[in-house]
Image (cartoon, helix red, strand yellow):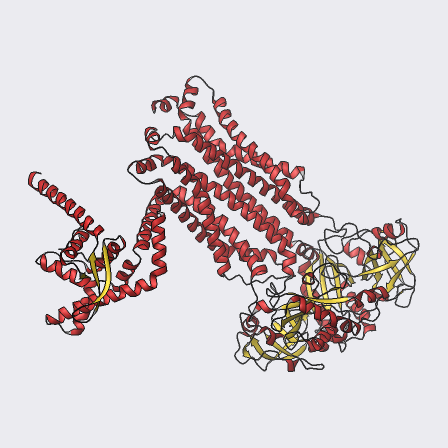
Amino acid sequence: MSVLSWWSRLRNHLRSNALSRDIDREIRFHLDERTDDLVASGMRPGDARREARRRFGNLGLQAEHTRETDLFAWMDVLIRDVRYSIRSLRSAPAFTIVAILSLGLGIGANTAIFSIINAVMLKSLPVSHPEELIRVTRGQQTSTKPPSEWNGVLTNPLWEQIRDRQDIFSGAFAFGGADFNLAAGGEARRVSGNWVSGEFFSTLGVRAAMGRTIVRADDYRGCPGVAVLSGAFWRGEYGADPNIVGKTVSLDGHPLSIVGVTDSRFFGVEVGERPQLYVPLCAQTIFEGPNALDRRSSWYLQIVARPKAGLTPEQMTARLATLAPAIVESTIPPNWPTEAIDSYRHTRFGVAPAEKGFSDLRTTYGKALYILMVIVGLVLAVACANVANLLLARATARQREMAVRLAIGASRGRLARQLITESLLLSLAGAALGGGIATYGSKMLVGLLSNRARAVQLDLHVDPTVLLFTTAVATITGILFGLVPAWRVGRTDPQAAMKSQGHGVAEGHSRFRAGKALVAGQVALSLVLIAGAGLLVGSWYRLATVDPGFRRDGILLVQANIRALHTPDDQRVGVFAQILDRLRAVPGVRSASVSLLTPVGSMTWNDALKVEGFTPKSGDDALSWSNAVSDGFFSTMGVPLLSGRDFDTRDGATAGRVAIVSEAMARKFFGSPAVVGRRFQVEQGNSWTPPIEIVGVVGDTKYQSLRDSAQSIVYYPQNQQEAESERRQFQLRVDGSPLAIAPAVKAIFAEFNPSITLDLKTLDRQLSDSTTLVRAIALLSGFFGALALLLASIGLYGIMAYNVARRRNEIGVRIALGAEYGRVVRMVLGEVSRIVVVGVVIGIALSAGTTRLVKTFLYGLTPMDPFTLGAAASVLVVVGLCAAAIPAWRAARMDPVAALREE
Amino acid sequence: MPRQKNDILQGTLALLVLKCIDAQERMHGYAITSHIQRVSADLLRVEEGSLYPALHRMEQDGWLRAEWGTTEKKRDAKFYTITALGRKQLALEEESWARLRDGVARVLRYA
């Protein structure tokens, strides 16, 4: 296409409105004249008009032809190119299938990962004008970070102060995550929800699909509480009951009246969560006691607001800064240490964009997702190299075709365009396949990222961003791998090519060099992927098999909540002790215990300790993890008692306070494991507890995470702890499968009191849930590494098969002259080895730069772990030699006479 | 579109159009179709749908000049006149037509 015709097409396009009016007028004139003539010859006017139109042909089509003559010609060529490409691809089905499959897998993987990144990080909230929304953040006056990076979690007293004092927002609301139990007793049926302030729905501009949303009038101190259901919950739990409004839903045993159902498209403001229902903030007093709204150190609310028109973030931050002292002063938490209160007084507020909502998925999975994006990008690069290589081989085979076309006058540009069309067609077919793969792939991926403790729920509908991404990826890859052969056509010398009679001798060599470089590149990228996968899989294996300091199998964990029993604080421990006695009598239970927390659970507890002779280096250095446990906890969990004794009946509520400590605690605070009889104190508000005597030392265990090193842990007898919590964890060591005794355990609780709610899982499950993310990226990187390896081996096989075919004559001569079988094989394998070695060396250099990316996910391995790198390199060498074995064998078995006769 | 028996041989439409306009000086599209049909004694019929693209192309190539005018029936119509470049083209086309005709005639006679 010449520059001139592009110009005139452009001009036609720009003029097209005037032009189209012009043409329409001209055609109308023609039809009028024809109609007149037909009428004059005796036809009825209506018929004449129809006949005139019929003779002219399809009006719209003609007008189009006339208007866009240039565009039409261009389209015509394009259609011919496409038809020709389809024919030529059909004539090489093996090539086409391998190419489309490679691209489909590559593009599909990229689209799948991208659609998750899109859902988690890029999509705006499905509310009105999401771009206006901001969230209120909280930081220290002295903070060097910008307010947009401050923490956004606040208390209810802070929210009430900000709500009542601010004058810069046209609407603002607070919300917090809530976890309700639908079951009235027995095993819990968890449902996630949101506490929302009265302005939640009006500020977001979200309407009810049925009934009404929560409004300001619902949110006042002492409110009876109402519930708004999400569309999904309404359908799933109530079968889309049209008379739902006015019914009640029981949450943690409290009946709330259902006032409406939200629009189905609205999934809340936290990406990755799907609140099933919304309850006004004020109703917290019903669930958590009369002072629930006045807890000044209960951090769980986030504030979102719509600023008044024209305010900049700086103006808002400035205004909030002047309001801050008054807000802070009236919400100072009681019982805080003096330094903590001083620092609280310096709290300031800022704003940050909230267009895309909130998500701790971004912090939890953001890095993993970007790593996966890099991985699938590399896989796509390997796939592209494969297709480029296949196209190169094809270009050599088609050299004569191209030469003939050049000789009879096709321009090189025309041929290059033909080849690019072919490549784009391949990549579009790959994109179509990839789109299909991605739909399933992204769902599978989200499944991999979810576990029982956390179900990730994302809006994965294909939207324009994802479509644009896939199309762009397909087009770029198509052009990338299509350019090489197209460029080579530009250099084809028709005469030389025709003379070579299709043996490709003249062009073959440079094609071979380009091919070898591509394959070496594939080997290098595959090595990076395999090494990365090796590191991640190795880390996961280490995490899965690490000794946590306790026995991980054969233990059933039962979390029991006795909130519905309304037991007074001082009797709760007794209730749990009674239940424990009954559980110990269940047949099949070898031992049982109860504790406040379980290792690697979702909750932690730490306190500052004071030990004579120990000077903490910082405030944090004085901290130790804590837990409250019953007797038998250590024997049930299999934690060795190193010295001293377990808790027993001596350690009652009124007896002298005692504790058992981990060996790491003893070494850290006392510098020696022999600490039985020593004493320490625990910080409590602004003072310290009376001295607590250590009666035993136990082995180190993991506390928060399987990645923990030896942790300092203090265990208190549960009788001596104030029973603030209505929840306890029971541990049951059983013979055989822990879940097998679940029915018996549930029966015991039901018999004791049917309104106690339960969550049951095995300890092993709790531990493996904590490694979900590592497992997911280990599995995925392993899968993609294997895929890259497969693609690279296809590339290696292809290039060696081609090379053997190319050197048929030469090898024939060698065999005829007496070269042995082994020598020929060695010659071919030697060539492969050189490619692989070059690839491996480049790959190791690349790994040095890239495996650092996964460092945060590694456990027990360094990014340049020599064993892993060595193993990855060996895998590539072995796979490379295997891929070359068939061509080598074929070369050695060659019949020299047949090979030479061809000459 | 179904092909008609007496379609104008491809490549000759430009020749015929240029010739008519050269002879009549100023014509609109409809007049061109009826003129060709009449002069050829109904042997040739211009496919109406391809006439206008051809006219448009010839206008763009500078062979024809177009302007809007009014017919005797007071209708707006686009009138075409031939340019100097168009006359040159006409001469070329006439010459190549003569060659083609002679060539075909010879083949028919001697083959």
Depth check, front residue: A168 or A11: A11
- Measured from the top left, where is residue A658 in percent x and y? 89, 61
| Above or below: residue B36 compared with residue A331 | above
Q: Is residue A667 left or right of residue A99?
A: right
Horizontal relation, residue A173 to residue B105: left or right: right
Q: Residue furthest front?
A: B84
Taking A893 as reference, is A335 above or below it? below
Q: Is residue A892 above or below residue A45?
A: above
Residue A611 location, quadrant? bottom right
Residue in view at x 35 percent, y 56 percent = A11
Q: Quadrant of the C terminus of chain A?
A: top left
Picture coordinates of residue A533, whole percent (x, y): 61, 44
Is A348 on the left-hand or right-hand side of B28?
A: right
Left or right of A558? Residue B86 is: left
| Residue located at (23% from left, 53% from top) | B63
Query: What's the residue at 25%, 64% (across, down)?
Result: A59
Q: Which residue is more in the foreground, A187 or A355? A: A355
Q: Can residue A187 be spotted in the picture?
A: no
Q: Is residue A239 visible?
A: yes
User: In the image, residue A168 lies at what x, y percent?
Assistant: 66, 74
